[in-house]
Structures are given as C-alpha cells and as structure tokens.
Image (spheres, rainbow, N blue to C red):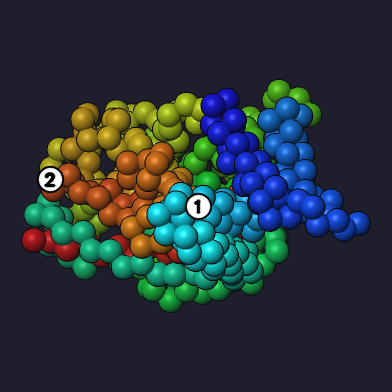
Amino acid sequence: MKFILLALLLTVLPDIYIWFSYLHGHSSPWSWLYWLPLAVIILSLVMGFVVGVAPMTFLSIFFVLVLGTVLPKLMFTIVSLLGRGVGYVLPQAPHVANIAGVALAGLMLISAIYGFAYGWKKLTVVDVEVASERIPKAFDGYRLVQLSDLHISTFHRSPQTIDRLVEMVNGLDADAIVFTGDLVNLAPDELDPFMDVLSQLRAKDGVYSVMGNHDYCVYGRHQDSTAPLRNTREVISRQKTLGWDLLMNENRLVHRGADSIAIVGVENDGEPPFPSYANLPKALEGLTDEAYKVLLSHDPTHWRRDVLPTTNIDLTLSGHTHSMQFRLGCFSPSMWTYREWGGTYTQGDRALHVNTGTGGNVPFRFGAWPEITLITLRSK
C-alpha cells in the first residue's frame, strides 16, 4: 500500500506543478486534455487493484502512459525545482533548468517510443564463459543456450519475432538449450500460434525447461477455483508436446564418453507473493558430490536463499527479473528489488547467470533487450 501511495504521489504531483506553474490561466476549450492521461492511469490502477487484475490491453495502455507521460513530467519537475532552488543564488538557473528539463523529458519520451515500437523485438545474443576445475575435460567448450521469460502472448503482435528467435538459436548450434521459466503470461492457449515454431528448437542434447511463476496460471480472472490447476497441467502438457524435457524437481545426466554433467531443474522457488514448489533434495537425488551441476531455477533469489547454503551446485541459470525491461549501463530499476537482477554473478567458484528474458507483461524494452544467452563451459 505504501508503494501504491508513493506511485500515486509521483504521478499526480508533477501534473499539479506543471499545471499551476506554466499552464494555469491559459484558457482553452481543449485544456481538459492535459488531465486525460492522468485520468486513464488512475482508472488503470482502479482496474488493477480494486476490480482485479487488469486485462493485458489495459495494462499496456497504463505502461505506455507511465513511460510516455508520467516519467518525462517527473524528470522535468525535478530539474525545474532544482533550478528554482539554485535561482536564489544564480538568477538564470530557473530558465536554464527548464530548458534542460524539457530536453531530458524529450529524451525519455523518445526512449519510450523506441522501446514500445522496436526495443521489445531487438533480439540480442549475450556470450558468457564459465570456467571451473570441476568441468570435465570432455565438456570443455560445451555450449548451452539459455532462453527465459518468453511470456509468449507478448508476441501475438509480432509472431515473426519468434520465428527469428528460433532461427537465431538453431544457428548457434548449441549442445543443449535450456529454458528457465515463464512460457506464458496467463493461460496455455497463448501458445496456440507458436506450437509449430517452438517445436523446431534443436540442440544435440535436447531442450530442457522448468516452470516459472506465470506458468502456474494464477494471474488473471478465472471462472472457478480449479482453473489454475487445469491450466498448469495444460502448460506442462504443451511443453512435452513441444519435445522439451520439463524438469519438475528432477535431473538429467548428459554424457560425453566416460564423462558427464548434470542438468538439474526445480519448480519455481520465489519469495512471497510468488509460488514456491522447489524441492532441491529431490532434484539432486542420485547425483554424486563430484558431478558438475547446472541448475535451472526461475527466480534468482533462490540462489542465495537455498542453493548456495545447502548444495554444491556449480552453475545456476535463472530469469524472472526481466531487468524490469529497462537498463542504462549498470543501472536498472531491478537493482532496487533484486540483489542479482541481470548478468553473471560469482561467489567463489560458483556462478549464477540471470537472463533478462525475451518477452514481458507489456511489449516494451529499452537497454534490457530480449536476451539469448550463449554459455560456453571451460575446463581449467
């Protein structure tokens, strides 16, 4: 609730400041249009938090308005107020600050337009090398492609992006493909237009996957209380139809001659309000301490909560954060919520890679482009 109130204040106060400082008194029959974006945003919040989860179209409109109007206005307001403060010492500061504020707001608006128009389709291959003395010599140079967070309904507006994704992944000629959860947004029928193309993903040792929080289909409106369970079973069935090896607290050994590595997969393990169904002891059954282990676990918070303190798993692959679909250099709003939110992290000789995902709840990305991770294992 505190977060919602803060968000409302940051949304409303810039509008009030700009109106009374620069627009009030300029009579026009169209002046009410200034308040229209704010009215739609408030209506979206009511739909989301009072009525229930807003439809995806309404959610998209909400984020378009937040990124295209609220954040530029907030940036202008902050810079303008700073200029007024400095103006007590330097009289020209308010004028210069207003110009700078308009310029920064304009850049934010351009970034938002690019992110909504093109950024969410800008597929990017990220190369990662993981070196360890525990990697068997036979697996030196072994190539894993990691995909995560397809949120497949994102691409109903651009199905050709999924065609290109599959073509790019297959072109990497990986030894194995791993998918770290969130195949759908709300329901399994989102997959209908994409079953054929996703079934074309190919790797020498196959495609392995795990469940993400969205794959349990607990979001959105349901006709009855049993619908999420039915939809979850359908998501599981769809992955098997695709030819993916869905790991539900299980492991698989991949062999190269006499050597092997283990691919371990757990169900989603998140902090509230996200579901937690992982069972690491069960997933590790039958594996020796000496085996090099690659864990697929959707939520990266699982790494510090359970993986590091209770297991000797070498490499963990996660997704979930999307880097909040916005990144400038080393900055992303995700860093305010997640300690590990995008990229590769190490502790001793153990590593975590957080894939920033491909899709999202809304079709927008800037900086945190849709990611295909190519991980190469190196034996020291």
Structural crowding at the residue carrying mark 1, measured as other residues with C-alpha within 10 Å and reported as few (<14), some (14–19) or many (≥20): some
Asked which secondary structure carries label 2, the reply is loop
Residue 245: where, in percent of width, then height? 45, 49
Which residue is at the front of the view, 176 or 295?
Answer: 295
Q: Mark 2 is on which residue type? A: Gly
**Element type at mark 1:** helix
Q: Nearer the viewer, residue 342 or 176?
A: 342
Nearer-N-terminus badge (2/1): 1
Question: Marks 1 and 2: in contact by CB < 8 Å?
Answer: no
Q: How many numbered circles does the render carry?
A: 2
In the image: residue 324, left or right of residue 10: left
Q: Residue at x 91, y 57 (%)?
A: 29
Q: Is residue 193 above or below residue 45?
A: below
Disc 1 marks a residue whose amino acid type is Arg
Query: Which mark is on residue 365?
Result: none
**Between 287 and 315, the one nearer to me in the picture:** 315
Quarter-of-image position of residue 150 = bottom right
Residue at 66% across / 51% down in the picture?
21
* Front tag of 2 and 1: 1
The residue indicated by pointer 1 is 84
Which residue lies under the disc numbered 2?
348
User: Between marks 2 and 1, how big is the CA–CA gap?
Assistant: 50 Å
Report the residue that reaches farthest toward the right: 29
Q: Quadrant of the N terminus?
A: top right
Residue drawn at (55%, 73%) of the image: 164
Can residue 217 be seen in the rendering of this structure? no
